[in-house]
Amino acid sequence: MWWTIFTLIIITTAATRFYNLEKPAHVCWDETHFGKFAGYYINRTFFFDVHPPLGKMLIGLFGYLDGYDASFPFIKPGDLYEDKPYLGMRLGCAIMGAMLVPLSFLTVWEMTFSLSAATFAGLLILFDHGMLTLNRYILLDPILLFFISSSVYTMVKFHNQRDRPFSFTWWFWLASTGLMLTGAVSVKFVGLFVVAFVGIRVIADLWDILGDLSHPVSYTVQHFVARALCLIVLPACTYMAIFYVHLSVLNLSGPGDGFFSSAFQVSLEGNFLNNASTPKEVAYGSLLTLKNSITGGGYLHSHLHLYPEGVGAKQQQVTTYGHKDGNNRWFVKKFNKAAPKWNSTDPIELLHNGDLIRLEHRPTRRHLHSHKQQAPISRKHYQVTGYGDNGTGDANDVWRIVIENGAENEVLETMRHRFKLVHYLMNCVLTTTQKTLPKWGFDQQEVTCNPNIRDKSAYWSIEDNRYPRLSNTSFSEYKLNFFQRFVESHLVMFNGNAGLKPKEGEMTSRPWMWPINLKGQFFSAGVEGAKIYLLGNPVIWWGNLLLMAIYLMFLTIRTVSDRRGIVQSPEQLALNQRVLHSCGWLYVGWLLHYVPFWSMGRVLYFHHYFPALLFASMISGVLIDYMLVTIPSMLPKVLGKSAYQTFLGLFLAGLLYSFYLFAPLTYGMSLAPATETNSTMHGMRWLPTWEF
């Protein structure tokens, strides 16, 4: 019976996950990002993303195995794939997403050894439209969910080996847990939540072992060391190995260069800093690129667009920009002289610590300028603009160079020196606040003049220095080793995650909306029969909420009963303990994967709830089984069997019928809204917040 049910679940999972997987045959939602990133791995082009690399590496591998040559640009959602082999990437993600159903089944089986509880848990994952939709596209989510689910399963399997400590199977499942945890964290940093879950389980196990007086304390130390090796050392080494492969594969210059320090870029083939040379000293007349020295800092940038009405003076915008661009280039000249020509025969004059200079934007010939107008966002700072015409301006264009820990009259050097630009008249310092400007600023970062000259974000360095009259020196001496690049990669990712704020007009959501299934999000729209909407099966999601509340009531009742010494039969006591134990740990998992989002300041989306949904659905599977056993047993024997069959029939019928009703959300709706009678979803808009 066990294998029959398990096989049927796997067959049904495959049928639902792989049905019409090639549709829609266009880019859907975040496929525009992760499909593009996969292509970068295939052609070895360096890029930046806020997530660790494993998920994107796997998607790249899926595409490579399918013959994808990274020739599709993935510009925007809705672009047709035409004859490009995209299906391999979708199939790889779908296979990993499909594994959630058997993994949930097996996890609950190992926790309860109840076939019905395991079956119910598997069915709740199987027939959820949200989980189904999320796992059919080129996304990180199915890969992340696979590693989270695998981590929980291997942890439970390891726990069940507690009577065979240090045996081969004990070591196997312990090491497997460590590897699955590494996978989760290497896809997204939210994988740390399952690390915390496993860590709490490990602490509880060690506490139980310490309390076993039949063994000496040294026995507990042995268990601790074994867990430290498999759950800390092994994952740490594997995690670093993943990054080593990532940095080795992406060895060609690409769109991510500018997010990293100049020294980091020296290792990238095709980057002008790699095996290139440039003048060591900076001379008047040099054409420079200035990079902010904070982690992930951008280039000092300007363009032919003015600040809008009501935002300080209506002068040319100055920002920082994370990509290399012709608008990042500035001529440096003395405060009272024009920049010398490159073919001049006059003596070369070098820049020194303390010099007064002007920076002239090469494309627009306007000076870097500041005045006592409020900055666009940081109201206690002064506005920075591009001002003047054809290289002329006024006294507010003058800045003083202050080299960090520099000696008096020390010559400014490319890459090696960090320096500040202090405004000559206002004694404020040029800085970036890392705040993103509105659409009129093209989502670039605010540049201001901060009256607090101790601002740590106000340091700049010279990355590109062009002046043909000076001899060049190599940048190879600045090349970083793997560990330095590993650390910088994480600092840039952390900084990028912290900077993820909602963009103007962007559809986001808040954590309180997720469990109640208040609002979904479109994956695809505008194509007849291919309109896809991410939304959970409301019967499952609302049922999960109800059952989690029932669990808390049950826990309270059992706690009071135990305190009052109410006697239970051995069978009922064992059943209650099994349910309390398994649901208790699953509840901890749900809390760890849901509650932290309430404190996050970054932008959040509906799909962030799905790891927590795994735990909620497994809790529901255990509780449904418990109620189907317990409630009929309270009735007269004649009614008990009928009640069990009735409740089971209603549950299965509700599950299947709700899946049938909402299936067009996953497989494709008509363009007509649900309010119209010709819509495939007519009458199914149960909440006004559902947009389909």
Image (tube, rainbow, N blue to C red):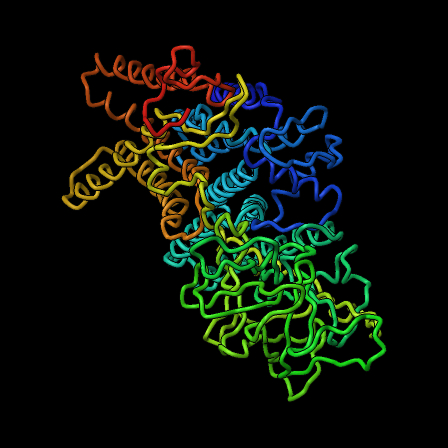
Q: Which residue extends farthest left?
A: 564
In this picture, residue 217 sits left or right of residue 686? right
Depth check: give the residue in front, 652 or 26: 26
Q: Nearer the viewer, residue 321 or 104?
A: 321
| Residue 110 visible, this angle | yes
Residue 178 can be seen in this image: no
The image shows residue 68, relative to residue 374, as above or below, that is above
Quarter-of-image position of residue 78: top right
Answer above or below: position of 226 versus 519.
below
Residue 506's spot in the image, x, y percent? 46, 41
Which residue reaches farthest bottom?
A: 408
| Count of all numbered marks drawn on residues in the image | 0
Q: Residue 444, position in %: x, y?
A: 55, 54
Quadrant of the snapshot with the C terminus: top left
Residue placed at 68% from the left, 69% from the top?
462
How far from the left and from the top, in percent, is residue 157?
Answer: 49, 41
Q: In this rendering, would 57 be left or right of 273?
A: left
Which x, y percent locates residue 419? 61, 76
Q: Residue at x 26, y 36 (%)?
A: 549
Judge by depth and name the residue closer to the eye, 297 or 169: 297
Look at the picture and state if 136 lies above or below 663: below
